Amino acid sequence: MFIIVGLGNPGREYASTRHNVGFMTLDILAQRWDIDIRKKHCRSLLGDGRVVGERIILAAPTTFMNNSGEAVRDLMNFYKCEHDKLILIYDDADIDAGTIRIRSGGSSGTHNGMRSVIYQLGFDDFPRVRIGIGKPQAGRDMMYHVLASPTGEEKDKLTQALSNAADAVEMIVNGKLSEA
């Protein structure tokens, strides 16, 4: 079984923001795998399905980003998933917009949502797919940057990055983490 968690903020006003690229990638996976993400459980919206013989749980926490760890902890406690079968997808302002990076573990970096997840779980040895959203323009606040929607060329780059991130998750599920 894999638990695939996209990080973001709940609510319509955040739907297209940079901070919600994790949710957006989950939507792509749900469509590809024909998994409906609507069940409310463990402080998340969940979808449950089978892909390449594996049970897949797609989860979008209904907590706000900085408390995402509470929902992820609840999911891990309920489903008893192995660490390497938990995959997190989230935005990263330390990576250029439109770039993705995959890691098998590590620190939270500057991301408060990941900091919450690692704190609540007590471990950091799980795969993650980081989607670059770039840094804010000079003089702009980071909170404004992550909670704003991308436009123009940046939006195009992020659209491609979301597809690439979904491809990477599929590779991880297929046992190809190092290739991803």
Image: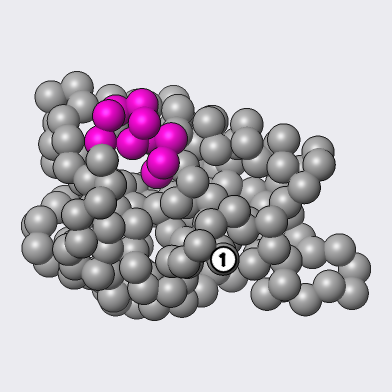
Tell me residue 106's x, y (percent).
Answer: 44, 59
Quadrant assignment for the N terminus: top left
Residue 80 seen anywhere in this rendered image of the structure? yes
Q: Is residue 125 magenta?
A: no
Decide if residue 53 is on the left or right side of residue 31: left
| 62, 81: nearer the viewer | 62
Q: Along the horizontal axis of the image, is 168 left or right of 124?
A: right
Residue closer to the observer: 113 or 158: 158
Q: Residue at x 41, y 41 (%)?
A: 27
Q: Residue at x 62, y 58 (%)?
A: 17
Point out the image quarter for the C terminus.
top left
Please tell me in which quadrant of the rendered image residue 152 appears.
top right
Indicate the position of residue 120 as horizontal and vertical percent values: 29, 76
Residue 75 at x, y percent in the picture: 19, 62
Q: Which residue is mark 1?
A: 13
| Magenta segment | 26-35
Q: How is the image coloured?
A: one colour
Give left or right: position of 92 versus 115.
right
Does 31 lie within the magenta span? yes
Which residue of the protein is positioned furthest toward the right in this rendering?
A: 138
Under circle 1, the secondary element is: helix
